[in-house]
Image (tube, rainbow, N blue to C red):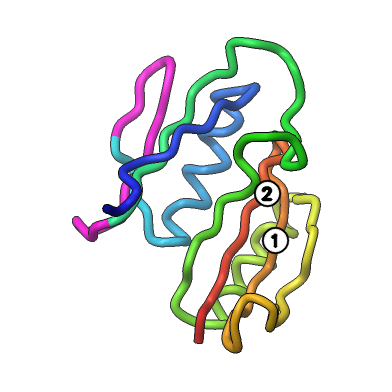
Amino acid sequence: MPLGHIGVNVRDLARARAYYDAFMPLVGFESFFAADDEFSYRPAGGKPGTYLFFYPALEDGGYSRHRPGLQHLAFMVRTREDVDRLHDWAVRQGANVISTPQEFPQYGPAHYASFWEDADGVMLEVVCHK
């Protein structure tokens, strides 16, 4: 069975929404719905895939991908040029870049990706498998 959805808690819902409203269309997602206490995205154009929901964190504390829980979110893109373009977008947003676009042969012969952190420190990856 495919994964239905993922929920992510964020410290500042408005800031996260502004960031993800700009980012998600770049990786093939559209807004699903938004309310005062959550917002979400789904694969654009009725395509099947995992939905992503964001909620306000109800407890204070920083996120760490090194603790139990969510390690990172990976978004598949069609081309290596898309990886490069999205990396450049992240840099323009002031992201903490973890890895510039490059091949990661340990994940397969055609794994080309870039990694960075969003404002809450959640690691994001864009990857092309071609």
Query: Label 2 neighbourhood size at 10 Å, few (<14), some (14-19), many (20+)?
Result: many
Q: Residue at x 67, y 66 (%)?
A: 87
> Mark 1 touching mark 2, by CB under 8 A?
yes
Query: As drawn, is 1 to the left or to the right of 53?
Result: left
Q: Residue at x 80, y 51 (%)?
A: 96
Question: Is 42 one of the magenta-colored residues?
Answer: yes
Q: Amino acid at mark 1?
A: Phe
Query: As drawn, is 91 to the left or to the right of 18?
Result: right
Camera-side residue of 51 and 27: 51
Is any part of residue 127 visible from this angle? yes
Q: Which of the two labelled residues, at mark 1 and mark 2, occupies the earlier sequence position?
A: 1
Magenta-highlighted residues: 33-48
For label 1, the SS is strand
The residue where tag 1 is placed is: 115
Label 1 to label 2: alpha-carbon separation: 7 Å
Instruction: Write down the quadrant of residue 19 in the picture.
Output: top right
Question: Is 101 one of the magenta-colored residues?
Answer: no
The residue where tag 2 is placed is: 123
For label 2, the SS is strand
Query: Label 1 neighbourhood size at 10 Å, few (<14), some (14-19), many (20+)?
Result: many
Q: Residue at x 47, y 43 (%)?
A: 21
Q: Point out residue 27 in the picture as x, y percentages from the top left corner.
A: 45, 61
Q: Residue at x 55, y 24 (%)?
A: 13
Q: Point out residue 7 in the picture as x, y percentages from the top left corner.
A: 46, 33
Q: Point out residue 129 in the picture as x, y percentages from the top left corner.
A: 51, 80
Camera-side residue of 73 and 91: 73
Q: Is residue 10 above or below residue 78?
A: above
Q: Amino acid at mark 2?
A: Met
